[in-house]
Amino acid sequence: MSKPHPSSLELYTQAAEHSSNAVIASYSTSFGVATKLLAPEIRQHVRNIYALVRVADEIVDGAAAEARVGGGNVEPSFALDQLEAEIYKTLRSKFSGNLVVHAFAKTANETGFARGIIEPFFVSMRMDLWPRKHTPESFQKYVYGSAEVVGLMCLHAFVKESDFSMQDYKQIVKSARALGAAFQKVNFLRDLSADFEKLGRSYFPDVDPTTFNEYQKAELLGYIREDLKVAAAGLKFLPVSSRKAVAAAQMLFTELANLIEKTPAEQMLRARISVPNPTKFLIVLKALIGVVPK
């Protein structure tokens, strides 16, 4: 029996999700590989989330600013406001002329996350619109909005068909937030010099990239490893459909932390650390056979 033809909305939604996939493929090959370890229905939701995150990031960090330098009449803060408003409108209308927003709203509606964890993301994105040095309080707020809530969005996709005790669910939420925080802090360390020199940002409180030293690096890595430990505690609660992909992502960032530890602080200001492709491949194989970080 032949499959029924998709409706106009179904066809449009398929196109929207293809657009999200194209965004992921263009910006992050490692992430694209990691998502292949997810069950297909979850994989698309996670790609829809990260495509939206990528678009917002380009508004505050990359493409929008470059367009403005090239003579374009673009105001990043206004563009970010428009993007956020379009999301909330689409959550209600279930349709957007912006394909990435359309796919993101579909995921939000189907997995059950709403404005309460979307708003903090845009609060953090607005912090990136102007050069700044963070206080401990603003840093915590920034990491929550830019990374931890993204982990919570993905968590909704991971567990939407699962039942947990309240105690277990609290641990899963705590672990999802910790993993998002660890990812963000590792990226801050990798981009320490570039963020300061190109964007005028210093994310870590009381850390001056021009005088960054081994003591500061060790202290920051200590915080990251604490986050990774908390994250690992929640892996056993995740459904098999998502556990391998999350384990692979955590092992990848653990390897990045290990490489940072081995790299002299002064060298980190000259080159961005990355995991070699053969090591990435080995990490994926480990995740496939069920290895999980501890």
Image (cartoon, rainbow, N blue to C red):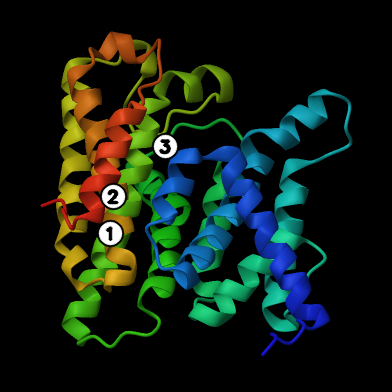
How many labels sit on residues? 3
Q: Which mark is residue 248?
A: 2
Q: Is residue 73 left or right of residue 14?
A: right
Q: Which mark is residue 293?
A: none
Quote the CA–CA distance across marks 1 and 3.
Answer: 35 Å
Quadrant the N terminus occupies: bottom right
Q: Is residue 184 left or right of residue 178?
A: right
Amino acid type for the residue under numbered disc 1: Lys
Q: Nearer the viewer, residue 170 or 1?
A: 1
Q: Is residue 284 left or right of residue 221?
A: right
Residue at the (61%, 40%) spot, across then down: 26
Helix, strand or loop under label 2: helix
- On the question of residue 253 being in view, the answer is no
Quote the CA–CA distance across marks 2 and 3.
Answer: 31 Å
Name the mark nearer the viewer: 1 or 3: 1
Residue at the (75%, 61%) spot, across then down: 99
Q: Quadrant of residue 243?
A: bottom left
Amino acid type for the residue under numbered disc 3: His
Mark toward the start of the polypeptide (2 vs 3): 3
- Work out whether 94 lies above or below 134: below
Q: Which mark is residue 244?
A: 1
Q: Which residue is mark 3?
A: 134
Furthest residue in direction front, as rendered: 1
Mark toward the start of the polypeptide (1 vs 3): 3
Q: Nearer the viewer, residue 33 or 227?
A: 33
Specify few, some or many for label 2: CA neighbours under 10 Å numbering under 14, 14-19, or 20 or more: many
Quote the CA–CA distance across marks 1 and 2.
Answer: 6 Å
Residue at the (24%, 78%) spot, across then down: 169
- On the question of residue 267 being in view, the answer is yes
